Amino acid sequence: MREIAARPLTPSAFAPFGEVLDCAGEPDRIINRGLCGRWHDRATLDMDDAGRPGISLFLAEPRALPYTLDLVERHPEGSQAFVPMHEHPWLVIVAEDGAQPGPIHAFVAAPGQGVNLARGTWHGVLTPLHAPGRFAVIDRIGPGANLEEHVLEEPVLIVGP
């Protein structure tokens, strides 16, 4: 089985797949009488004209490293943002673009980091490393087939950094 080491999630390493959502650096604006920092417009929600953005809540079973990846999916009709509702690291798995998933990349998101997956990006399922695996997911709600799944011919073993 092929083995991939998960690396820390950084905006530059993740850029080919979407955007990292976090409060790194200084806020863009200070609001609410100076009591709140705003990191403004951090993700591009991209969806076809038939859909609308929606927020859903997910509760995923925690996994452990090493983790065997055997399934990836993508959403061709819209981007998909995963925003953790917990303060634990979690695993982000993506594959390079193509009709079939290309090379796999794995990242460990730090507490407080989310991601916005670009439209059509092959990715693993929600993979929390600790309970509770609670996430807000912002994605396209609407008609049509917005889910493609691909079972990997050869599973990939994701190990820690």
Image: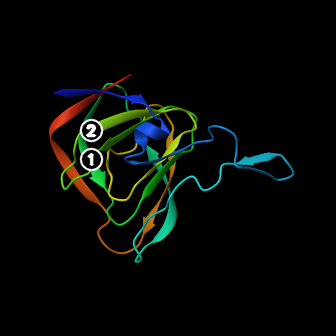
In the image, residue 14 above or below residue 45? above
> As drawn, is 109 to the left or to the right of 72?
right
On residue 104, the disc is 2
Dot 2 crowding, Cα within 10 Å, few <14, some 14–19, many 20+: some
- Horizontal and vertical percent for residue 150? 20, 51
Image quarter (top left, top right, bottom left or bottom right) of the C terminus:
top left
- At horizontal 52% and vertical 32% (from top left) the residue drawn is 110
Of 151 and 75, the residue lying toward us:
75
Q: Secondary structure at mark 2?
A: strand
Q: Amino acid at mark 1?
A: Val
Q: Residue furthest bottom?
A: 50
**Residue at 58% over, 34% down:** 87
Residue 72 circle label: 1
Whether pointer 1 and pointer 2 mark residues with C-beta atoms closer than 8 Å, the reply is yes
Q: Nearer the viewer, residue 70 or 45?
A: 45
Q: CA distance from mark 1 to mark 2?
A: 10 Å
Left or right of 22, for residue 5: left
